[in-house]
Image (tube, grey):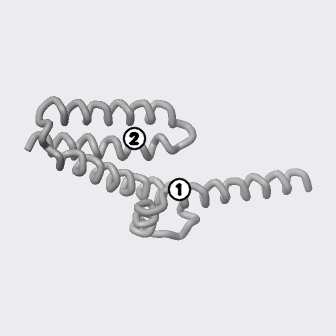
Amino acid sequence: MTTYSAMLLLGAYTGMLQVDARKPRSSRPALVGSVLVIAAAAVFIFSFDRTNWIAPFVFFGCLWLSSALYAAWGWTNRFPEAGMSFWAFFVRELYDNSFTAKQYATMLDDRERSEAQSAAAD
């Protein structure tokens, strides 16, 4: 039971770290933290119960769901111009986690170009 609890917690934390690692400003500390947590989960699994083959699936399932939930929450707050609900962001993150980031980058690029053109016109 403690193995599954640890895998749930480590998976959720790693999912949130992976979402933070995709942000340009905080990518390095979150990436290092994500690698360290995955290594700790592997050590935890093999140290206590080597025959527990379900624990890695629990870990990666929780990682996948928590990263999608955390990213959807972040995009809902950061990108309201998309006009998508939390659940629409969540479903999009489950199967294509780079789509929203590309749309956001395109919107920021268009905004910078229009500001540069308006500044050049003045």
The type of residue carrying mark 2 is: Leu
Instruction: State the mark number for residue 39.
Output: none
Q: Secondary structure at mark 1?
A: loop
Answer left or right for 114 relative to 41: right
How packed mark 1 is, by other alpha carbons closer than 10 Å (few <14, some 14-19, many 20 or more), is few
Answer left or right for 93 relative to 44: right
Q: Residue at x 52, y 54 (%)?
A: 78
Numbered-mark total: 2
Please tell me which of labels 1 and 2 falls first in the chain.
2
Camera-side residue: 39 or 50? 50
Q: Residue at x 64, y 54 (%)?
A: 105
Residue 109 image position (x, y, % from top left): 71, 54
Camera-side residue: 44 or 107? 44
Observer-side mark, 1 or 2, equals 1
Residue 64 image position (x, y, % from top left): 34, 53
Dot 2 corresponds to which residue? Answer: 17
Q: Residue at x 57, y 41 (%)?
A: 24
Q: Picture quarter containing residue 106?
A: bottom right
In the picture, the quarter occupied by the N terminus is top left
Camera-side residue: 95 or 29? 95
Answer left or right for 73 relative to 63: right
Answer left or right for 61 relative to 21: left
Q: Picture quarter containing residue 94?
A: bottom left
Residue 111 image position (x, y, % from top left): 72, 56
Camera-side residue: 83 or 65? 65
Whether the residues at callouts 1 and 2 have beta carbons within 8 Å, the answer is: no
Q: Is 72 situated above or below 88? A: above
Dot 1 corresponds to which residue? Answer: 98
